[in-house]
Image (tube, rainbow, N blue to C red):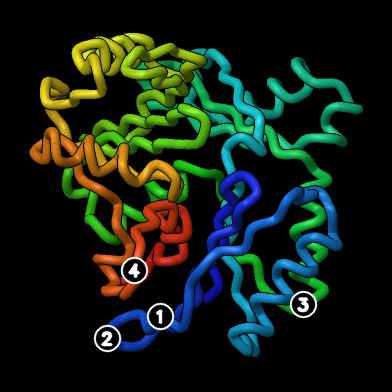
């Protein structure tokens, strides 16, 4: 199993083999590029090919996660309908012309029914085609294609049994002060928010889903001046992970309020020995979906 997660110009990878008792980790690491063309067949041909050769994988099964910044997000109001698929087709025909439909593929994910909205993820067809063509070239199987924080959320469902919690938040500390956060209640997506942390001042960039839940999160953030998160208090566990450059920020958050915040640490869960923490591996953990880890 080869799992790869894009984080800007860095691509984190984790290779493992399932066994009857536990996953056996064959290797992990990251590749960094000055500039990556994620809509290029040649780029993925090289990326996938290098890793397949590195680990001598005979029948490659790839799980790939795109940086959320490589995708476009929107939301739609939903009427009182029992079947979402016919309405989804109507949305496509109403909101987008044939030219747009050729350039982007749209995936609709309804929020909790009470919110009456759907999250819409727009993926460039050139990116998707480049990924599919390169997997076909290497006679590989693309098992899963996801985006950023959603892969991390899928990861904690397996590693932390989050479905038993039913109510939890996932928080990604990204580069350039960018933060992504999703809230799950009763195992349903409630909201996705994107905000910046500028020296303890929190600025909302955008949100999707429930406005009241977004306001609750932001009000708690406002208590955390000078990046002191000891006063952050929501009645649910918050799972946190980050790019490698934000490790110090993550540890400060965890240490200031360990009853509220928990790091998504694949290294610890899988007993990977690594000199430096690299919590971005949370987005490669989608590969463990469906396995008892």
Q: Is residue 223 above or below residue 275?
A: above
Say which of 6 and 291 sits in front.
6
Mark number, residue 21? 2
Residue located 37% across and 10% down the image: 211
* Mark before the other along the chain sequence, 2 or 3: 2
Q: Position of residue 271 (x, y in %)?
A: 26, 74
Residue holding disc 3: 138
Residue holding disc 1: 25
Residue located 57% across and 62% down the image: 4
Residue holding disc 4: 275
Using the rendered image of the protein, determine whether residue 145 is visible from the camera's viewpoint: no
Determine whether, in the image, residue 117 is placed left or right of residue 214: right
Q: Distance from label 1 to label 3 (Cα)?
A: 22 Å
Q: Position of residue 239 (x, y in %)?
A: 27, 42
At mark 1, the secondary structure is strand
Say which of 148 and 113 sits in front.
148
1 and 3 marks in contact (CB < 8 Å): no
* Foreground label between 1 and 4: 4
Q: Position of residue 222 (x, y in %)?
A: 25, 11
Residue located 41% across and 49% down the image: 152
User: Which residue is the extreme one toward the right?
Assistant: 99
Q: Residues within 10 Å of mark 4 (few under 14, many from 20)?
A: few
């Amino acid at each position: 199993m080869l799992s790869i997660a894009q984080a800007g110009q860095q691509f984190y990878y984790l290779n493992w083999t399932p066994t009857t008792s536990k996953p056996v980790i064959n290797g992990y690491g990251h590749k960094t590029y000055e500039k990556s063309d994620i809509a290029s067949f040649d780029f993925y041909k090289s990326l996938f090919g290098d890793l397949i050769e590195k680990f001598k994988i005979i029948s490659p099964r790839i799980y790939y996660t795109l940086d959320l910044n490589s995708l476009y997000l929107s939301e739609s109001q939903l009427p009182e309908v029992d079947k979402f698929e016919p309405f989804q087709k109507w949305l496509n025909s109403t909101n987008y012309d044939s030219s747009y439909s050729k350039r982007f593929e749209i995936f609709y994910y309804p929020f909790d029914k009470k919110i009456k909205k759907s999250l819409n993820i727009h993926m460039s067809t050139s990116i998707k085609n480049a990924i599919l063509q390169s997997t076909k070239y290497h006679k590989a199987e693309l098992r899963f294609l996801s985006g950023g924080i959603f892969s991390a959320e899928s990861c904690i469902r397996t590693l932390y049994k989050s479905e038993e919690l039913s109510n939890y938040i996932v928080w990604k500390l990204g580069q350039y002060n960018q933060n992504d956060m999703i809230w799950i209640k009763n195992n349903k997506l409630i909201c996705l928010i994107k905000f910046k942390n500028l020296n303890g001042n929190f600025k909302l960039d955008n949100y999707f889903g429930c406005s009241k839940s977004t306001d609750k999160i932001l009000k708690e953030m406002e208590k955390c001046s000078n990046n002191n998160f000891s006063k952050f208090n929501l009645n649910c566990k918050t799972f946190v992970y980050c790019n490698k450059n934000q490790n110090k920020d993550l540890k400060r958050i965890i240490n200031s309020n360990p009853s509220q915040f928990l790091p998504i640490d694949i290294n610890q869960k899988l007993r990977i020995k690594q000199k430096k923490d690299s919590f971005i591996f949370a987005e490669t953990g989608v590969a463990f979906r469906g396995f008892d880890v």
